[in-house]
Image: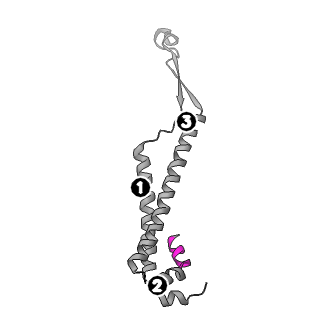
């Protein structure tokens, strides 16, 4: 998406270079925008993830598991005495760890920076005259 954004903003970036912006300033601009999008996406993802885990905890059903052991004839007809049935209730939960949240946020930032770097390299190579010559 960043490469498409740079492709659509060729005239804008070309104008900035024609006004005296250096390649470094253009790169910082594009990477900064991508970083801000990565932060916003990471925060939105964290909020959505926490909301979904809270919803799972609030609305998840409780499952009942039953197991029977023993039974049958057994030795000397005592199998019925050794038979037993165990029932257990299992509540579905979605635990969330801080480390998972941090890794997810870090991946969102890394994705934003990688995309910004790729777009920034393309933007930095623009020649002002060629950029201003393009028709939208």
Q: Is residue 71 above or below residue 103?
A: above
- Decide: marks 3, 1 in contact (CB < 8 A)? no
Instruction: Nearest to the eye among marks 2 and 3: give it.
Output: 2
- In the orientation shown, which residue stands out farthest toward the front? 19
Question: What residue would you read off at disc 3?
Answer: 57
- Decide: marks 1, 2 in contact (CB < 8 A)? no
Judged from the image, the secondary structure of the residue bearing numbered disc 3 is helix
Residue 3 percent coordinates (x, y)? 50, 74
Q: Which residues are magenta?
A: 2-9
If you read the primary sequence from the N terminus, does the residue marked by circle 3 or circle 1 appear first? 3
Q: Is residue 94 above or below residue 113?
A: above
Judged from the image, the secondary structure of the residue bearing numbered disc 1 is helix
Question: What residue would you read off at disc 2?
Answer: 19
Instruction: Nearest to the eye among marks 1 and 2: give it.
Output: 2
Dominant SS of magenta comes to: helix
Q: Tell me the residue at 45%/72% (across/down).
A: 29
Quarter of the image with the C terminus is bottom right
Q: Is residue 126 above or below residue 83?
A: below
**CA gap, disc 2 and disc 3:** 56 Å
Q: Tell me the residue at 47%/58% (across/down).
A: 39
Crowding at dot 3, Cα within 10 Å, few <14 / some 14-19 / many 20+, comes out as: some
């Amino acid at each position: 998406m960043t490469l498409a954004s740079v492709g659509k903003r060729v005239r804008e970036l070309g104008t900035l270079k024609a006004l005296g912006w250096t390649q470094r300033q253009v790169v910082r601009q594009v990477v900064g925008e991508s970083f801000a999008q990565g932060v916003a996406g990471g925060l939105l993802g964290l909020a959505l993830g926490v909301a979904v885990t809270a919803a799972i905890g609030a609305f998840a059903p409780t499952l009942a598991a039953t197991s029977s052991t023993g039974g049958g004839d057994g030795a000397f007809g005592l199998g019925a005495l050794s038979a037993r049935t165990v029932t257990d209730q299992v509540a579905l939960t979605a635990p969330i760890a801080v480390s998972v949240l941090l890794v997810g946020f870090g991946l969102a930032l890394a994705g934003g920076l990688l995309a910004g770097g790729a777009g920034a390299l393309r933007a930095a190579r623009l020649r002002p005259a060629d950029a201003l010559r393009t028709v939208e």
